[in-house]
Image (cartoon, rainbow, N blue to C red):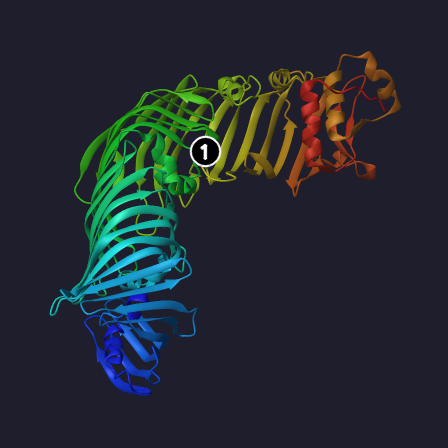
């Protein structure tokens, strides 16, 4: 608004030319055209009593339009006492009102060879100087001018942008030569700048810096050049969130905007020390979306790159605390909004995501992604870890075409004393509105379950994990597996099917699966868990298991023994006590209660127990036969055999899940005392 108001100066000259002896003089002008602004419905009135030292000047304009600067105002009115300066010039200082907004203070001095004006509001001031020797030039001095005063000019280049905070200081030269386009150039200092778009997809706060601006407005286009340094602040562009350091960061850019065609930045330069060096070109569509990119990136120290430039992307990937070191060079190209190519080289990169237990060391080699013809590359690492499970070196030989990465050969990784092999590995980076997609086959051979369990803080299982998954797919933050896995454990097997994960690297990861147990050696299991000894073979199932943040939410489980020829079925007194403690069970018959303390173990015919978990309540059950459902609503857990015959019966079918977990933990720590009923 300030510059548009100051273009009323030609009318002030007209007013000053009125005879001083007149008591009242007025003039109405339908239209006044200047190189920058057009004024309509103009009224000038001068009241100057005879022989008075000063008069009152009143100026009104129904409309003021400055299209090159983006200003359009209605109902401007300025009143001020008009006085001679004693040297053939005039002075006038008074309040200026526009559109009913907060008034400004406008002071104008019209000398014989120059014009000076100052527009102020509070501590903000915009001063103007024009010289008769250079009639095409107007000099503007800014002092603590609100950033929002440049809103109209900014809207010419970016219609959706809203300047929300900050102040500007500096000097600008506005040049309006005849038959040539408007030009604004000079140096500005920005403090605590803020901006945003209505949808919040682009925003900035606390931006500071000093830069030279060169702005031109030829017909049908806009030319802008910025050269300077930014100091501190933060800004958001889509999912890219940048936090700038407090020290100066040199930058330079040239921009060309064409009406209705978006912006092209043919030259961009960014210098953030060892963290990031960038140069190249970018083009935006009219909606500010990226269309074309050709940019070279270089980081000699990746330690600051994540927190400073990649936190938005890492947060979406579920890796907000990712730490990195090493160096990276890359060239990125986009064309028509789609990926054209990425050519990156990694130099001894280390990555650590402590919150997810993910780490790599010695990442090295090149990674090339092509949106067209095939290109080959090879990436390597020395070692890594996932949730505390270490794995060895690997080489990934890539071939890329049509925006997709494919491994040229199977990738094998040593882990847990065995091998993990990835077959047909395919990676599709985000494109066309789709997120990251990964496909692969998985083969596991000889992974030691004991080592796995102990690494995760569990007991020392015996057995191996073998099997293959023909196809697995990661898309839309979900990982699905076809086929299943077979674990050889406790001299039996556990088959895993319907395996999937949601948000595997995000907040509250969720795992779903079905388990089938076949012929597990109960003696080996109870020894591992220090539960008391039970001999026999265990079968069963766990259907619909759903873990949220690795805690059970739902499942339907049923476990039971199956007689085997030559396999004894005995249960120790301690195991009986533990089963009773965990499952709110009792011994049947007074003779059992009196004799249980006299025997070390007992024979049994069958053992069976079930739990259907939902809403933190476990609905318990026992053996599935007519004799298993006893009078009074009880259910048989252990059906005895021989003398003394021992039956264990549960009566509480609805058990609070957290309470059940506490009881299991107490059994594992040996903190269970015998209770005879």
Residue 505 vs residue 309, the one in the foreground: 309
Looking at the picture, how far across and down is residue 603, in whole percent? 74, 18
Residue 365 vs residue 146, the one in the foreground: 146
Looking at the picture, how far across and down is residue 402, in whole percent? 22, 45
Report whether 101 appears left or right of 270.
right
Report whether 651 appears left or right of 25.
right
Looking at the picture, how far across and down is residue 399, in whole percent? 22, 35
Residue 437 vs residue 239, the one in the foreground: 239
Residue depicted at x 82% and y 37%: 631
Report whether 599 appears left or right of 663.
right
* Residue pointed to by mark 1: 484
Whether residue 206 appears in this view of the structure is yes
| Circle 1: element type | strand
Residue 86 vs residue 291, the one in the foreground: 86
Question: Which quadrant of the view contains residue 119?
Answer: bottom left
Up-down relation of residue 131 to residue 586 (above or below): below
Up-down relation of residue 595 to residue 371 (above or below): above
The quarter of the image holding the N terminus is bottom left
Mark 1 closeness class: few <14, some 14–19, many ≥20 residues within 10 Å: some
Question: Which quadrant of the view contains residue 650?
Answer: top right
Looking at the picture, how far across and down is residue 416, in whole percent? 44, 19
Residue depicted at x 25% and y 58%: 285
Report the label total. Answer: 1
Residue depicted at x 12% and y 69%: 178
């Amino acid at each position: 608004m300030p510059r548009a108001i100051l273009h009323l100066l030609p009318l002030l000259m007209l007013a000053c030319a009125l005879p001083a002896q007149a008591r009242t003089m007025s003039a109405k002008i339908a239209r006044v055209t200047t190189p920058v602004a057009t004024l309509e419905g103009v009224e000038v009135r001068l009241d100057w009593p005879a022989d008075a030292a000063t008069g009152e000047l009143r100026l009104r304009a129904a409309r003021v339009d400055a299209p090159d600067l983006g200003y359009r105002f209605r109902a401007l009115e300025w009143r001020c006492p008009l006085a001679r300066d004693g040297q053939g010039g005039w002075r006038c200082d008074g309040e200026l009102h526009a559109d009913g907004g907060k008034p400004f203070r406008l002071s104008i001095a019209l000398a014989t060879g120059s014009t000076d004006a100052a527009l102020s509001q509070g501590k903000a001031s915009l001063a103007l100087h024009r010289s008769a020797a250079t009639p095409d030039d107007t000099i503007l001095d800014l002092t603590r001018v609100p950033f929002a005063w440049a809103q109209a000019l900014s809207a010419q280049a970016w219609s959706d942008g809203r300047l929300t905070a900050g102040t500007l200081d500096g000097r600008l030269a506005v040049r309006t030569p005849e038959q040539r386009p408007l030009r604004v150039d000079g140096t500005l200092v920005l403090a605590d700048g803020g901006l945003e778009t209505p949808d919040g997809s682009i925003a900035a706060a606390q931006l500071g810096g000093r830069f030279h601006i060169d702005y031109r407005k030829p017909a049908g286009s806009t030319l802008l050049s910025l050269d300077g340094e930014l100091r501190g602040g933060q800004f958001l562009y889509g999912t890219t969130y940048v936090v700038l350091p407090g020290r100066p960061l040199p930058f330079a850019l040239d921009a060309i905007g064409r009406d209705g065609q978006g912006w092209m930045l043919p030259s961009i330069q960014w210098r953030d020390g060892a963290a990031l060096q960038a140069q190249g070109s970018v083009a935006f569509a009219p909606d500010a979306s990226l269309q074309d990119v050709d940019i070279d990136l270089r980081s000699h120290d990746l330690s600051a790159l994540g927190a400073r430039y990649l936190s938005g992307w890492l947060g979406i990937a579920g890796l907000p605390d990712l730490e990195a070191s090493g160096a990276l060079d890359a060239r990125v190209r986009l064309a028509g909004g789609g990926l054209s190519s990425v050519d990156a080289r990694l130099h001894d990169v280390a990555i650590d995501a402590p919150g997810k237990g993910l780490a790599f060391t010695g990442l090295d080699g090149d990674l090339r992604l092509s949106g067209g013809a095939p290109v080959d590359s090879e990436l390597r690492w020395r070692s890594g870890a996932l949730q505390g499970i270490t794995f060895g070196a690997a080489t990934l030989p890539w071939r890329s075409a049509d925006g997709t990465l494919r491994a040229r050969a199977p990738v094998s990784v040593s882990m847990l004393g065995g091998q993990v092999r990835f077959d047909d590995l395919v990676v599709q980076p985000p494109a066309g509105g789709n997120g990251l997609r990964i496909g692969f086959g998985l083969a596991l051979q000889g992974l030691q379950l004991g080592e796995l369990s102990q690494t995760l803080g569990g007991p020392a299982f015996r057995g191996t994990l073998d099997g293959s998954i023909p196809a697995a797919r990661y898309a839309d933050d979900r990982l699905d597996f076809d086929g299943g896995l077979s674990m050889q454990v406790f001299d039996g097997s556990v088959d895993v099917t319907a395996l999937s994960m949601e948000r595997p690297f995000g907040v509250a990861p969720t795992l779903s699966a079905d388990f089938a147990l076949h012929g597990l050696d109960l003696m080996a299991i109870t020894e591992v868990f220090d539960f008391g000894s039970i001999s026999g073979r265990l079968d069963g199932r766990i259907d619909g298991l759903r873990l949220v943040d690795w805690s059970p939410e739902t499942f339907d489980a049923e476990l039971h023994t199956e007689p085997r020829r030559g396999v004894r079925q005995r249960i120790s007194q301690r195991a009986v006590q533990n089963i009773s403690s965990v499952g709110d069970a009792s011994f049947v018959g007074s003779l059992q209660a009196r004799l249980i303390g006299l025997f070390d173990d007992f024979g049994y015919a069958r053992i069976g127990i079930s739990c259907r978990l939902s809403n933190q309540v476990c609905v318990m059950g026992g053996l599935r036969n007519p004799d298993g459902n006893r009078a009074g609503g009880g259910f048989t857990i252990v059906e005895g055999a021989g003398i003394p015959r021992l039956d264990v019966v549960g009566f509480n079918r609805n058990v609070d899940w957290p309470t059940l977990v506490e009881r299991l933990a107490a059994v594992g720590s040996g903190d269970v005392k015998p209770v005879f009923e």
